[in-house]
Amino acid sequence: MKCSSSDNTPKLKLPKFELKKFSGDPREFLTFWSIFSKLHVSDDLTEVDKFQYLYQCMVLESRAARLISSFPITTKNYSKAIQQLKARFGREELLVHIYVRDLSFVMKNAVAGRNSPDLATLYDMLETKLRTLESLERTKEKFAHFLQPLVESCLPESVLRAWERSRISGVADDSTSQRSLEKLTSFFCVMKSNSGE
C-alpha cells in the first residue's frame, strides 16, 4: 500500500502582504530595502514596473517620495533613483552613526534619570540597537570594547552593582570582551526576568 499525500493535501493559500512604505527615516531603510529588494532583483518585472512599485512604496509627501518623484518614470531613471535612495537613506556609515547615536541617547537618558524606562523596556531598547548594529556588521566580536561600556552606562545602578559583583565572584568570565558583552546582555536579561517586568 502506497501513501500518496501530495494529491490529497489541500493547498495553503497565504495572505498577500503589502510592500512596506518608506518615509525617508534612515532607521526604516534596512527593513524597507530587505523587502523591496525582492522586487528589485526580479527578472519578471521591467524597470518601469519596478520604478512604479518603488514610487508606490514611498509615504506621500515624504522626503523619500520627493526624491523618487524628482525622476521621471523611465527605464534609465530607475537605477538612478535607486542609487540616490541608497545614497541618501541607506549608506552604511550613516546608519551606524544613527544607531550608535540612538544607543548614546538611551545611555544619556538612563544616566540623567530622565524618561527612565522600566527594566524590560530598557533591555528591549538596548537589544534592538545591538541587533541592528550586528545587521550592519558591527558585531559584538569586533566592537565589544566600544559597546560594552555604552551598555553598562545604560544600566540602572542596582543592575550594574549586581553585574560587578557577579564579575568579581567569577560568575561572569571576562576572558574576552566579546564574551563579556554577551554575558552582560544575558545577565541583564536574567535580571529583567527576575524583576517581573
Image (tube, rainbow, N blue to C red):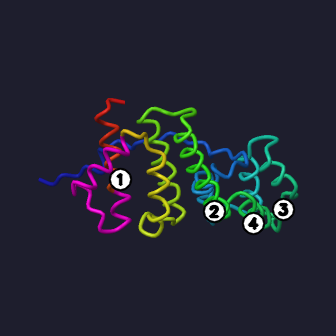
The picture places residue 75, in percent across and down from the top left corner, at 80, 65
Mark 3, mark 2: which one is toward the viewer? Answer: 3
Q: Which mark is residue 74?
A: 3
Residue 169 pos. (x, y %): 22, 54
> Which disc, if any, is residue 164?
none
Quadrant for residue 171, please give it.
bottom left
Precedes in sequence: disc 4 or disc 2: 2
Region of the chain picked out in magenta, as a range: 159-182
Q: Secondary structure at mark 2?
A: loop
Q: Which residue is mark 1?
A: 184
* In the foreground, 47 or 129: 129
Q: Nearer the viewer, mark 2 or mark 1?
A: 1
Amino acid type, mark 2: Asp
Whole-percent x, y for residue 6 in the image: 30, 51
Question: What's the CA distance linking mark 3 and mark 1?
Answer: 52 Å
Q: Which residue is mark 2?
A: 44
Q: Secondary structure at mark 3?
A: loop
The residue depicted at 16 percent of the width and 54 percent of the height is: 2
Q: Quadrant of residue 40?
A: bottom right
Q: CA distance from mark 4 to mark 1?
A: 39 Å
Q: Is residue 60 magenta?
A: no
